[in-house]
Image (tube, grey):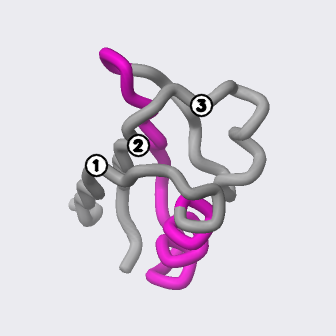
């Protein structure tokens, strides 16, 4: 699974956490953190979701778009 992902987390994370999310960029909307970037494969997505779980963050949504 390659494609663009937008992952929404409930709180605002500091930009210093960006390197923990395997190439995803951090931006903000309302009071949420948005992780955006291109996924290499399904394992890449699972790695990012594991970081979110390990940091005990509240996941709001995962939106995926395949290329093309």
Left or right: 25, with 10 as reference point: right
What residue does disc 1 label?
A: 60
Q: Please name whichever residue, 66 or 22, is drawn nearer the observer in this view of the structure.
A: 22
Where residue 45 sits in the image (x, y, percent)? 48, 71
Q: Please name whichever residue, 68 or 21, is drawn nearer the observer in this view of the structure.
A: 21
- Mark positioned earlier in the residue sequence (1 or 3): 3
Q: Is residue 40 above or below residue 12?
A: below
**Residue at 31% over, 15% down:** 30
Residue 9 is tagged as: 2
Q: Which residues are magenta?
A: 29-52
Q: Is residue 25 above or below residue 31?
A: below
Left or right: 55, with 40 as reference point: right
Q: CB atoms at circles 2 and 1 under 8 Å apart?
A: yes
Q: CB atoms at circles 3 and 2 under 8 Å apart?
A: yes
Q: Is residue 47 magenta?
A: yes
Query: Which quadrant of the figure has residue 22?
Result: bottom right
Q: Secondary structure at mark 2?
A: strand
Q: Is residue 13 above or below residue 58?
A: above
Query: Which quadrant of the figure has residue 55?
Result: bottom right
Q: CA distance from mark 3 to mark 2?
A: 9 Å
Q: CA distance from mark 1 to mark 3?
A: 14 Å
Where residue 46 sits in the image (x, y, percent)? 50, 77
- Mark positioned earlier in the residue sequence (2 or 1): 2
Q: Locate the C terminus and report the quarter of the image it occupies.
A: bottom left
What residue does disc 3 label?
A: 13
Where residue 14 sits in the image (x, y, percent)? 67, 26
């Amino acid at each position: 699974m390659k494609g663009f992902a937008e992952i929404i987390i409930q709180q605002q994370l500091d930009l210093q956490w960006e390197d923990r999310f395997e190439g995803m960029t951090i931006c903000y909307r309302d009071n949420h953190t948005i992780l955006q970037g291109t996924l290499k494969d399904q394992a890449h997505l699972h790695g990012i979701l594991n970081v979110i779980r390990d940091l005990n963050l509240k996941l709001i949504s995962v939106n995926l778009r395949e290329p093309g």
